[in-house]
């Protein structure tokens, strides 16, 4: 067994206000191996993006880590001085945001942004950086990269801009990429292309990926393992094939049941989708015990009084008293 590239242990993130300390991430632990793609899935407000921001050291004030540790290749990075962390961000860890325009400077040509990033992190000439940038643009599927390298971001489509962001992230050859909803703003055909590209990069380069999304179809297509988040905690984590086919946690089952399936229709099912009643709780109103218990049709008294930890169940780890007791 090789050591994981990324190890997150007992992560806790709080957002204090005048009335209380709101817990956005509560005791989250997971690992990502080298070349592995881990999907992080859940409803809006589950804590997916906050987890990614915590790993990058990019939490927006007043949010801050109040517990746990984050290690990259065995080295703890959450306690590093900011100047050291900046050298890791962009070099060893890259991030792809939902809106590529948040990553690209609108007044600089895309080639200048890529070459500048390379020259900040490596001793490379301007000519070599430009040649490398053209090769990267070609690798991520930009047509005629020798011409597009001098384009401004607004001259490209949304899908092309997201490809440029991937080239920008890859130019320093990071060991880990955190992709936060990288396909949400794109049409379906372009989404498929970007997902295929991320998958190919992980396979061909050995890059680890943490893919944050609410789209289970994307997870099914690209991830090796999946972590289902709910109200700031991991409800279930395991091999993607097993979690999709036989989810153990009631919330995970509800998510899978809400996905339309032609196979089920062909097998004689009536095609009705599962409905999860209620809504994700606000941070100021997380219930006692299992946070999912008010929406769960299988809850027992212990679920309402005691919060479950992740425990082994089949091939997954599940935070549910009904499954692990």
Image: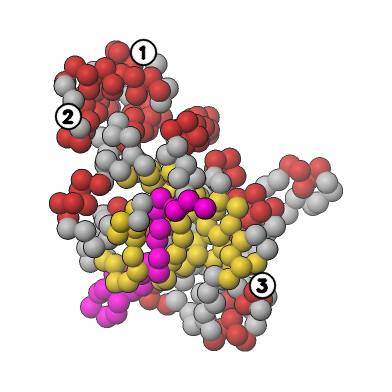
Disc 3 residue crowd, few under 14, some 14–19, many 20+, Cα 10 Å:
some
Foreground tag (2 vs 3): 2
The disc at residue 134 is none
Specify the principal SS of the magenta part: strand
Q: Secondary structure at mark 1?
A: loop
Residue drawn at the location 54% of the way across and 45% of the way down? 223
Task: Give the side of residue 279 with respect to residue 272, left or right.
Answer: left
Q: Earlier in the sequence, mark 2 or mark 3?
A: 2
CA gap, disc 1 to disc 2?
A: 27 Å
| Residue 49 is at least partly visible in this image | no
Task: Look at mark 3 in the image and give the residue it sits on.
Answer: 323
Displayed quadrant of residue 107: top left
Q: Tell me the crowding category of disc 2: few under 14, some 14 to 19, or many 20 or more residues within 10 angstroms, Cα based.
A: few
Check disc 3 and report its element: helix, strand or loop: helix
**Residue 228 location in percent, x, y?**
53, 59
- The reply to whether the magenta stretch includes residue 21 is yes
Decide if residue 34 is in sight here. Answer: yes
Point out the stretch of residues depicted in magenta.
Answer: 1-23
Question: 32 or 19: which is nearer to us?
Answer: 32
Q: Which residue is mark 1?
A: 144
Q: Nearer the viewer, mark 1 or mark 3?
A: 3
- Residue highlighted by disc 2: 123
Residue at the image point whose x is 20% and y is 32% from the top:
122
Q: Position of residue 190 (x, y in %)?
A: 48, 30
Residue in the picture at 44% in, 53% down: 4
Q: CA distance from mark 1 to mark 3?
A: 54 Å
- Please tell me in which quadrant of the rendered image residue 182 appears: top left
């Amino acid at each position: 067994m090789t050591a994981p590239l990324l190890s997150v242990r007992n992560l806790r993130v709080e957002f204090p206000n005048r009335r209380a300390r709101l817990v956005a991430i509560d005791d989250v632990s997971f690992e990502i191996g080298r070349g592995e793609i881990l999907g992080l899935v859940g409803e809006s407000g589950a804590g997916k993006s906050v987890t990614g921001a915590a790993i990058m050291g990019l939490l927006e004030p007043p949010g801050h880590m109040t517990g746990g540790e984050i290690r990259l290749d065995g080295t703890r990075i959450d306690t590093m001085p900011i100047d050291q962390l900046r050298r890791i961000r962009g070099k060893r860890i890259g991030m792809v945001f939902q809106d590529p325009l948040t990553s690209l400077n609108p007044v600089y040509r895309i080639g200048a942004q890529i070459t500048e990033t390379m020259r900040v992190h490596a001793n490379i000439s301007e000519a070599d950086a430009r040649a490398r940038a053209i090769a990267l643009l070609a690798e991520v599927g930009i047509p005629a990269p020798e011409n597009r390298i001098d384009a401004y971001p607004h001259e490209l489509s949304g899908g092309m801009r997201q490809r440029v962001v991937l080239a920008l992230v890859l130019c320093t050859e990071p060991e880990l990429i955190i992709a936060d909803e990288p396909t949400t703003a794109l049409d379906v055909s372009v989404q498929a292309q970007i997902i295929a590209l991320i998958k190919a990069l992980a396979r061909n380069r050995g890059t680890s990926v943490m893919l944050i999304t609410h789209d289970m179809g994307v997870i099914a297509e690209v991830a090796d393992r999946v972590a289902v988040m709910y109200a700031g905690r991991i409800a279930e984590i395991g091999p993607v094939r097993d979690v999709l086919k036989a989810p153990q946690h009631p919330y995970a089952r509800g998510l899978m049941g809400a996905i339309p399936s032609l196979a089920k229709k062909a097998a004689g099912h009536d095609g009705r989708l599962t409905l999860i009643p209620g809504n994700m709780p606000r941070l100021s109103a997380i219930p006692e015990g299992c946070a999912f218990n008010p929406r769960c049709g299988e809850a027992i008294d212990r679920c309402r009084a005691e919060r479950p930890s992740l425990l082994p169940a089949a091939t997954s780890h599940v935070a549910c008293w009904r499954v692990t007791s």
